[in-house]
Amino acid sequence: MYRYPLLSAVVVLFCSTADHSAEPAYRTDSGNEHLPWFQLRSGEFPPAGSGHYIAGELIALDHVNRTGVLRPDRNHSQRTDEYDRPLPFALLPYGSLSFHGAPAELRDIPIGTHLHGQFYFDKKGGNDGKGAFTKVLRLEDDFSFSTNQQRLWRIDTIALDKGEITVTGVSLEGNQADAASKVYQVTSATRVWKGRAIGSLTDLAIGQSVLMNLTLCTLKGPGRCTDIWLDLESRQLAAHQQFQAHFLYVREHGLAAVIDEVDNQHGIVTATLFAGFDFHLKNEFPVNDFVGAAVAEESLRTYDQAGDFMQGPILEVRSVPVVPGNSGMQIKFKPERLLEGYRPKRIVRLFSSRWRVVELPREERLYE
């Protein structure tokens, strides 16, 4: 079985090579409320901590264009007439997702899944002309969010006749419990995972430490449990299965990267891989091996990758500063020919020589 650290789940780090140290301060979730929110800049990764946390339920998605709609959780800053208003969003080119503790694509996440995200304000977003938080850096389900926070839920009481369980969040570091517990709904549709088998609600026991995925968090109190993982083995199996889906997708679609530099005289391209992929895949790009590059747009869709990608030797693989959206891995390669789309700040999909570049379904291609 594929093993993850701390679940072990992959904790994706985000960073940027841009230097924001001389910038004026901006508003964050932890302070500077009198200042405006950070504004994204074309061709640059954002600084760490500059995003805005929003959680909500996925109620619509377009997996091809990496867009969707969230029903945000209610909070005390909202007026009652703002409750449950849909929030359209678009994943940034370097935006990433995690599902069941492993890297994911939007297509992997079922409608109704409760998600936690880091959002950026778009002055052109929203329907009222006032802008909205519609640009997404990161989305992750409750399983992934709790794992990255190094937290589990302790079952305190079970009332199956009422369809309820009472749980308390507990930090794995120091076994520190939350001050207050929460009551979640369970139903006959709740999936219970026990080891490598499917369990049932009768397998729940007081004192168990579990992970949960939720839905209807604004309409059914704290939420309704869609899935409950009772033990480490079941959580590792869920992460392993999602990793396999991720690896299959990556092999067929390539890893997304931004071009940093093009040496036209020598025909050399330097590109930095976006964050959001399993770090073990770095081993698929050794120096002196070959890499293929297909031109992509900001939605990460390629034109016709099986027919218009160029391949060439990898000259260098080096580490760069890790910041939000940036994997910290930069590749310098020499394609057999420079394509028109090989330009600084443009996006490409990179393919290891060990992967077969396949033709994608028509709806995923930019060329008809």
Image: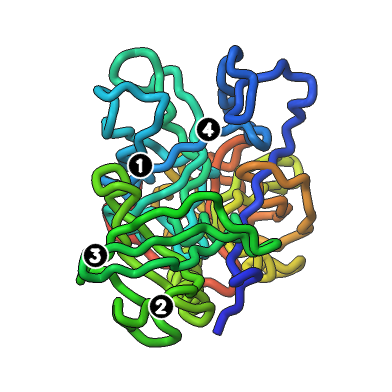
The answer to whether the residues at label 3 and label 4 have Cβ atoms under 8 Å apart is no
Quadrant housing the N terminus:
bottom right
Residue at (49%, 57%) from the top-left corner?
98
Residue toward you, 172 or 147: 172
To which residue does mark 4 refer? 52
| Earlier residue among tags 2 and 3 | 3
Looking at the rendered structure, the secondary structure element under dot 4 is strand
Question: x, y percentage for residue 108?
Answer: 37, 61
To which residue does mark 1 refer? 67
The answer to whether the residues at label 2 and label 3 have Cβ atoms under 8 Å apart is no
Q: CA distance from mark 3 to mark 1?
A: 34 Å
- In the rendered structure, the answer to whether residue 220 lies left or right of residue 227 reads left
Q: CA distance from mark 2 to mark 3?
A: 14 Å
To which residue does mark 2 refer? 205
Dot 4 crowding, Cα within 10 Å, few <14, some 14–19, many 20+:
some
Looking at the rendered structure, the secondary structure element under dot 1 is strand
